[in-house]
């Protein structure tokens, strides 16, 4: 892996994840209690033996940069290992990045300063585990100019991805970005082959293609829309099927680009047998570990009316949490969450520092960082009432409470305080 340079594209605005991305970039959105979304891509890279990594940022990157500084600065530069952040420099003009390919094109000066035979390009906003060394080895062995990571998805899902047609040797012969009618896999009429947005390029070949694309005025400068379709006819482009490292089956991979997809992926984690195994010690997912005490569950008072018992079932509870006489079910709790007596939290995601007041009820909600829920508040039970409070309610009925409603001074937004 010494001749591979890894690029992580982490400049996504994440409009479809608003309001979670109003104050942060998409890769910096918390996930699974203790992680940020980008932690999965970076963990994959480090676990794959990749130690030279550049993270390209753009949109509201302050919180992402802080997270990278405190979580991902353990590599030793004296041995040529690094995870560096590359903010936009506007070296080639006054425009910000116009597309995924343009983000790489505008950083060619920086890339050429790192000796590399191959460039691995990753997205910083997907949830999965993958050994990239297997894909890189397949690329080198095949003699390909470019290799694309792919996996089968249903035809309706295929409308949201770049779809590939391949021959029996896995060479890409056809490519369409987000087609209205995805073409199925031969012999599998219900599924199509989707690009994961993971690419391996020969370095000099990539630079030449980017320079050619950068000179075109009619290009959107995107890998899926422009670069890949332009090279499949005359160059060697290989498709690499994504398989589970442990089972060989099609691996767990989620694009959490919408609130409903983000909610579903978090709920996947609290299943009895989750498809994404976070407890695999052979493939750790790294996260920031603040100096917090273990979670605590207090009160088992059956004599009170109603009975008071602090417990969590089918849930992930992060360090610093106190479940103080409340009930948590099928939920994900971030750092320092407090659930007070008689409160009910069902199928919900609570970010760091959320406090749920006594006798409050939450169902299918996402509560952003630091929000204080007053006593006797109900969220997630009445769609019209939630919308009237200014919350976002998704098509699946998930209610999202943003940071702007945090604090005692905004308690009226959550309901009448207990009198």
Image: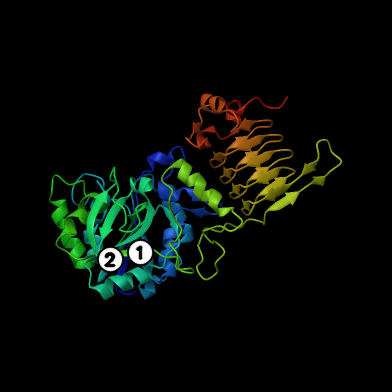
Picture residue at 70% right of the left edge, 38% below the top? 343
Quarter holding residue 185: bottom left
Q: Which residue is mark 2?
A: 170
Placement of 263 over or under 384, stated as above or below: below
Give the left or right position of residue 197, taking residue 247 as reference.
left
Number of numbered tags placed on the structure image? 2
Q: Which residue is mark 1?
A: 241
- Mark 2 Cα shell of 10 Å, populated few (<14), some (14-19), many (≥20): some
Picture residue at 56% right of the left edge, 59% below the top? 289
Placement of 154 over or under 202, stated as above or below: above
Give the left or right position of residue 126, taking residue 117 as reference.
right
First-in-chain label (2 vs 1): 2
Picture residue at 74% right of the left edge, 38% below the top? 342
Determine whether label 2 and label 1 are within 8 Å by CB. Answer: yes
Q: Nearer the viewer, residue 109 or 391?
A: 391
Label 1's element? strand
Label 2's element? loop
């Amino acid at each position: 892996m010494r001749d591979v340079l890894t690029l992580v594209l982490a400049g996504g605005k994440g409009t479809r994840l608003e309001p979670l991305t109003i104050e942060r970039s998409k890769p910096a959105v918390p996930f699974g209690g203790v992680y940020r979304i980008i932690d999965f891509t970076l963990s994959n890279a480090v676990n794959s033996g990749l130690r030279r990594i550049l993270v390209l940022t753009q949109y509201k990157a302050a919180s992402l940069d802080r997270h990278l500084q405190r979580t991902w600065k353990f590599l030793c530069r004296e041995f040529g290992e690094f995870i560096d952040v590359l903010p936009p420099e506007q070296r080639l003009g006054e425009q910000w990045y116009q597309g995924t390919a343009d983000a790489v094109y505008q950083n060619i000066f920086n890339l050429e300063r790192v000796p590399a035979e191959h460039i691995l390009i990753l997205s910083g906003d997907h949830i999965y585990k993958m050994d990239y060394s297997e894909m890189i080895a397949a690329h080198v062995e095949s003699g390909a100019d470019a290799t694309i990571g792919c996996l089968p998805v249903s035809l309706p899902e295929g409308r949201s991805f770049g779809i590939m047609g391949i021959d029996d040797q896995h060479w890409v012969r056809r490519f369409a970005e987000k087609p209205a009618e995805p073409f199925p896999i031969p012999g599998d009429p219900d599924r199509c082959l989707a690009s994961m947005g993971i690419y391996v390029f020969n370095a000099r070949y990539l630079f030449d293609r980017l320079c050619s694309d950068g000179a075109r005025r009619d290009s959107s400068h995107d890998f899926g829309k422009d670069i890949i379709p332009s090279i499949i006819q005359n160059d060697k482009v290989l498709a690499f099927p994504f398989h589970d490292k442990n089972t060989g089956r099609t691996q767990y991979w989620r694009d959490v680009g919408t609130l409903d997809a983000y909610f579903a992926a978090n709920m996947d984690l609290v299943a009895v047998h989750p498809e994404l195994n976070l407890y695999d010690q052979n493939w750790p997912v790294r996260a920031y570990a603040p100096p917090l005490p273990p979670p605590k569950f207090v009160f088992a008072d059956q004599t009170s009316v109603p009975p008071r018992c602090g417990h969590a079932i089918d849930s992930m509870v992060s360090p610093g949490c106190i479940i103080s006489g409340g009930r948590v079910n099928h939920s994900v709790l971030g750092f320092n969450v407090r659930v007070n007596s008689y409160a009910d939290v069902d199928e919900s995601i609570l970010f760091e520092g959320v406090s749920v007041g006594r006798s409050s009820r939450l169902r299918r909600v996402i509560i952003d960082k630091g929000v204080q829920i007053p006593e006797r508040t109900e969220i997630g039970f009445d769609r019209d009432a939630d919308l009237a409070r200014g919350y976002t309610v998704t098509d699946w009925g998930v209610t999202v409470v943003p940071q702007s409603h945090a604090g005692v001074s905004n308690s009226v937004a959550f309901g009448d305080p207990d009198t």
